[in-house]
Amino acid sequence: MTDGIPGRAWPRELLWAVLVIAVATMAYGWAARSGRPAPAGLVGHGLGVAGFLLMVVAETAYTWRKRPTRTGPGPAVRWLEAHVFVGLVGPYLVLLHTAFRFRGLAGVLTLLMAVVVGSGVAGRYWYTTALPVGPERPRRALWYVLHVPLSAVLFALAAFHVVGVLYYAGNLR
């Protein structure tokens, strides 16, 4: 069920991500029954914070655990599954946070987030279906060279966005 071989069932992390995204979509639809929630409202900020925190987990937890010299609870493959799950759900929650308004830095962040997620999806597919198994498997690829640096840029700009929102809301003045 989770081996990523074409013709077999979807990987479980993808199934869970689709399920959570469906539930989040229904909840957002319920909250939007009298108009789309504003990005700065309680629902909007809640979605933004939850999505950002999930993205931070996606960025840091698997990256830390996959190093050969580090050990942790569970095998690295489970951490990759968690990385894929939160790497799909977190950006979706952030997309809902935008209320589909893509202006200024938020628009740039959304586009960059889409590229990072797209490169991650391509990399997951490439890694599980297009690569040989064993020592001849290459360690780095084009998707990785794109995915990792853009993730760092995304988080730097997202931090800038959060600080700016807090500053202009008066919480940092």
Image (cartoon, grey):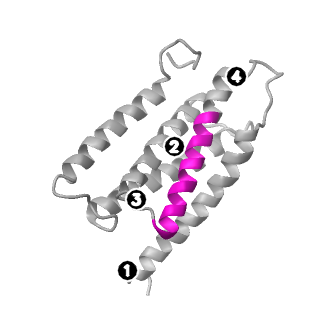
- Residue 169: mark: 1
Indicate yes or no whether the magenta region holds residue 142.
Answer: no
Image quadrant in which you'd find residue 63:
top right
Q: For the residue marked with disc 4, what is the amino acid? A: Ala
Q: Which residue is identified by label 4?
A: 130
Residue drawn at 47 percent across, 49 percent down:
91
Other-residue count near label 1 (Cα within 10 Å), few / some / many at <14 / 14–19 / ≥20: few
**Secondary element at tag 1:** loop
Image quadrant in which you'd find residue 94:
bottom left
Other-residue count near label 2 (Cα within 10 Å), few / some / many at <14 / 14–19 / ≥20: many
Q: Camera-side residue: 132 or 66?
A: 132
Q: Are marks 2 and 1 in contact (CB under 8 Å)?
A: no
State how far apart marks 2 and 3 are (Cα).
Answer: 14 Å
Please tell me which of labels 1 and 3 falls first in the chain.
3
**Depth-wise, is mark 2 or mark 4 nearer the camera?**
4
Residue 29 lies, in percent from the top left, at 23, 47
Q: Can you name the residue that lies furthest to the right here?
A: 136
State how far apart marks 4 and 3 are (Cα).
Answer: 35 Å
